[in-house]
Amino acid sequence: MIYNDPELVHTLQQVLEVLGTFAFAISGIRHAAAKHFDWFGGYVCGVAVAIGGGTIRDLILGVAPFWTTDIRYLLFTGLALILTVAFRKAMKQLDNAWFVFDTLGLAFFTIAGMQKTLELGHPFWLAIVMGCMTGVAGGVIRDVILNNVPVIFHKEIYAIASIAGGFIYWALYVLGFSLPTVAISTFLVICLTRFIAVYYHITLPILHDEEEKNDEKNC
Amino acid sequence: MIYNDPELVHTLQQVLEVLGTFAFAISGIRHAAAKHFDWFGGYVCGVAVAIGGGTIRDLILGVAPFWTTDIRYLLFTGLALILTVAFRKAMKQLDNAWFVFDTLGLAFFTIAGMQKTLELGHPFWLAIVMGCMTGVAGGVIRDVILNNVPVIFHKEIYAIASIAGGFIYWALYVLGFSLPTVAISTFLVICLTRFIAVYYHITLPILHDEEEKNDEKNC
Amino acid sequence: MIYNDPELVHTLQQVLEVLGTFAFAISGIRHAAAKHFDWFGGYVCGVAVAIGGGTIRDLILGVAPFWTTDIRYLLFTGLALILTVAFRKAMKQLDNAWFVFDTLGLAFFTIAGMQKTLELGHPFWLAIVMGCMTGVAGGVIRDVILNNVPVIFHKEIYAIASIAGGFIYWALYVLGFSLPTVAISTFLVICLTRFIAVYYHITLPILHDEEEKNDEKNC
């Protein structure tokens, strides 16, 4: 897939990655604080959320992880750590803001992951998988490090929003829309899917143990 | 290592990977159900068991993970999820069948992992390690995601069956047997080792803490 | 970066990796014993600590993991397992020795990781990150497998010693010192930082939950 304006693609991708990095780093550091990690643990946890998904994507795609050629991703996480330590009290008041930032990060990372995969010549189904992985794998790594069951596997709609966005990207691209239109639409679909799902408490069905009664209300 | 019939090798490897994928995906989804994951969580857990070991193998060997060039592995896991959700009650009656399928998957994946490693020109000791990793690493990832201590490190004979098969493969190859003979013998050794070990409750010795009394019965 | 004596660099790196491997393998096996893993589980846990960090480093740097071309790393871990099983009682008396060995391993692995990264032509900041990852990531994998919260994120100074050594390496290199001087100084800085921190109970500040009172003594 070749876009008409490779410069625009590249700039857009960089902006998306930087914004997503910052939002995700804050998320990792706050989770680490809840487990009383020290500053180094908080930093690593922030880095894991911020660059973990993209690192796995790049390893699977066989390219150098994006953060190894640009120190800014690690510096942004350091900045996120300093802000989190310095403005701890204020952080609590911003709970809704963090939810919004986290959702923006998910949308940013999904689109960045899809574009990178498509630019490398892979098919759309792999781009959707890689977009989702870019968006959610960092959070899974965070939960594994913190010794929690990954929250995206049994709570709110999160990964599904990323996948829904992926299919919209595909559909609009096939229909011949321009890249900015495709990217912005995908962005909106991911954010709206997540906001609506959380607002109306929409979740995926839960898997039931084979031993349980067949009564779906039981859980 | 070059076989006389590369077509046969390739076909055999594909069949092995598809069968193993399905058996392993079911295993992952059932474990996820026991922790009340949602459908997405169950799918990811199924995918992790089914393709996790092969993915780590391919990353270490420096080749593209096998499932990135063939959408069928992800589709099979989706099919496994649908079957598990639709036939939940029946699943319980099939407990012995799942044990058998899981063992077949272990044997399938071990051989597939070994052959891929050997085809890439690596020595036999690495093929045995990679065969074992292909067979068991997916289950370790599953247990880590589910926040369990990996079962293969303290329960039944599992990885050892894979390694025993690996040495048989090596021995028969050195003795000059044909590939079908080598593969079938390896397959039987892995399955029999596991069946016999489980039937007679044979396990590996347990490591003891340095603080414990030297009485081996104490644990 | 090209050193005057590539032979020396290579020999030094090999010695460092072998020594570090042995010290780290013992650490992994002893932690596995505390959770009553079987011999296979202990071996894998030893391998994870010994080669886990270097494997992640090599995957990120896009080179073949170091242990895939040299069976000795896996054999050393096997030897460590045999010694741990055979001399369990004696192990307990050696607690201080293991602490020393573990610190030496950290220093060895940090320097080995930095040199490999620099030899591949990467900048110093990435070498410091990779040196730290080589030294500490194996222990994180061990803790994840054992279902513990990684100890390096909330206890003693450990990773920070590695990073301090990394900056010393950088500074001395820029100042034009010879490789042996740089390596030995880095080694001493890492070991001393850790010894002093543990002796005087110096730790990093802990991150605080936003819900807690602002009283830093409260934790």
Image (cartoon, coloured by chain):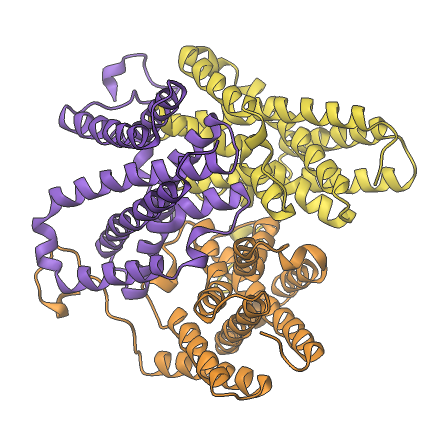
Chain colours: A purple, B yellow, C orange
At 10% from the left and 48% from the top, the residue drawn is A94
Residue projecting furthest to the front: A4
Q: Say which quarter of the image contains residue B132.
A: top right
Q: Nearer the viewer, residue A219 or C119?
A: C119
Q: Position of residue B106 (x, y in %)?
A: 64, 31
- As displayed, is residue B96 above or below residue C100? above
- As displayed, is residue A72 above or below residue A133? below
At 40% from the left and 48% from the top, the residue drawn is A52
Residue projecting furthest to the right: B176
- Does residue A123 appear left or right of residue C204 in this picture? right
Q: Is residue A145 visible?
A: no
Q: Position of residue B148 (x, y in %)?
A: 42, 41
Q: Nearer the viewer, residue C118 or A160?
A: C118
Quadrant of the image containing the C terminus of chain C: bottom left
Q: Position of residue A201 (x, y in %)?
A: 17, 25
Q: Position of residue C82 (x, y in %)?
A: 66, 61
- As displayed, is residue C93 above or below residue A169? below
At 55% from the left and 74% from the top, the residue drawn is C108
